[in-house]
Image: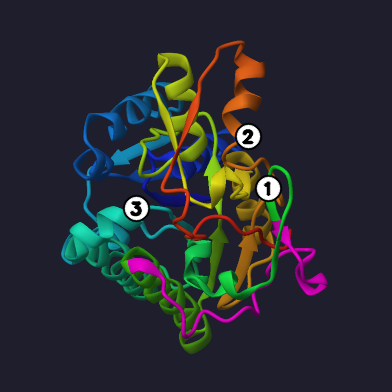
Amino acid sequence: MKLLVTGSSGLIGSEVVDYFCQQGWQVHGVDNNMRADFFGPQGDTRWNQERLKAAHPSFHHHELDIRDRKAVLDCLATLTPTHVVHTAAQPSHDLAASRPFDDFDTNAVGTLNLLEATRLHASEAVFIHMSTNKVYGDRPNAIKLKELDTRWDYDDPAYVGGITEEFSIDQSKHSLFGASKVAADVMVQEYGRYFGMKTCALRGGCLTGPNHSGVELHGFLSYLIKCNLAGKKYNVFGYKGKQVRDNIHSFDVVRFMHAFFENPRCGEVYNIGGGLTIPDGASPRRWMMCLKRFIKPRLENPSELKLLDGYCHRRV
């Protein structure tokens, strides 16, 4: 099997590389360290690229920008992979607002480049796109909530098990990042349904794992641990620190990808998450107990009622 992974030096992409190299697959990774451009030195992923090259003889790195259409077309024509996992993205709401062209060109246009290149040169390949739960925008805010001592929870029995894929993505505010990911998500579905390609979009919540170059704008748990170990202030934004994030480990995401590879379908969408986890305000205390280090979270903007990350999926 020959697998092409975009964003191969990132959290999910590198987990994909590790997993499938261990399965004996030939794995080609595409990455140009745009995370360092987006987030500065703390976001640099070259260390992970070098780790993968040293760990896996069957891994081949390609320095390529997915916004470069000709380069993407040439890459797919040369490699003709049997499987594609697309994880490369601009992942920040705030950065999307300040750099909207870079955001859309990376998330939406980059995805289209990969889809069309796959259709032209590897049409039988199974194509998995790492989407996001942000495609639902702020519509989950309309669900009735109840405030508990340490967390918010749904107060509508219809959502006890979380949000399903039938939940509307329309008539809501997404952020520019969410909008660019909607465009990519829908295009992945359309290439599956219109052209009959085996595609799926995975709508993840908060993704975590050991190989995350976390920063304040993206990479919640990774950044929290960095603050803890460095003794830095950790800011909690909004909802009194009771916002609940749906965390799932990168290894579990990749196991789901493998399952889809074994039984692919056309134009599918899956919410993928770990269910209810620890509220933002309680997370530093939990990690303090694990690491035996004290960090005092600071609550910022307590009246700012944003819930772009704090809802859970139905488990898949």
- Using the rendered image of the protein, determine whether residue 291 is visible from the camera's viewpoint: yes
Residue 92: mark in rendering: 3
Disc 3 is placed on an element classified as: loop
Of residues 305 and 127, the one nearer the viewer is 305
Residue 61 coordinates in the image, percent (x, y)? 31, 38
The foreground one among 142 and 39 is 142
Residue type, mark 1 in image = Arg
Q: Secondary structure at mark 1?
A: loop
Q: Which residue, as the protein is rendered here, is positioned at the far bottom?
A: 194
In the image, what residue occupies the spot 62% across and 45% down? 248
Q: Position of residue 159 (x, y in %)?
A: 75, 69
Q: Are marks 1 and 3 in contact (CB under 8 Å)?
A: no
Q: Amino acid at mark 2?
A: Ala
CA separation, marks 3 and 2?
23 Å
Identify the residue at image location x=43%, y=23%: 227
Numbered tag placed on residue 282 in the rendering: 2
The residue that label 1 is drawn on is 151
Q: Amino acid at mark 3?
A: Ser
**Residue reaching furthest front?**
303
Residue 316 in sight: no
Q: Residues within 10 Å of mark 2 (few under 14, many from 20)?
A: some
Please tell me which of labels 1 and 2 falls first in the chain.
1
Task: Point out residue 82 in the picture as x, y percentages from the top left corner.
Answer: 49, 59
Q: Nearer the viewer, mark 1 or mark 3?
A: 1
- Residue 192 vs 145, above or below: the answer is below
Q: Is residue 197 left or right of residue 272?
A: left
Q: Please say whether residue 60 is one of the residues in the magenta stretch.
A: no
Nearer the N terminus, badge 1 or badge 3?
A: 3
Q: Residue drawn at (48%, 64%), measured in percent from left and top?
A: 134
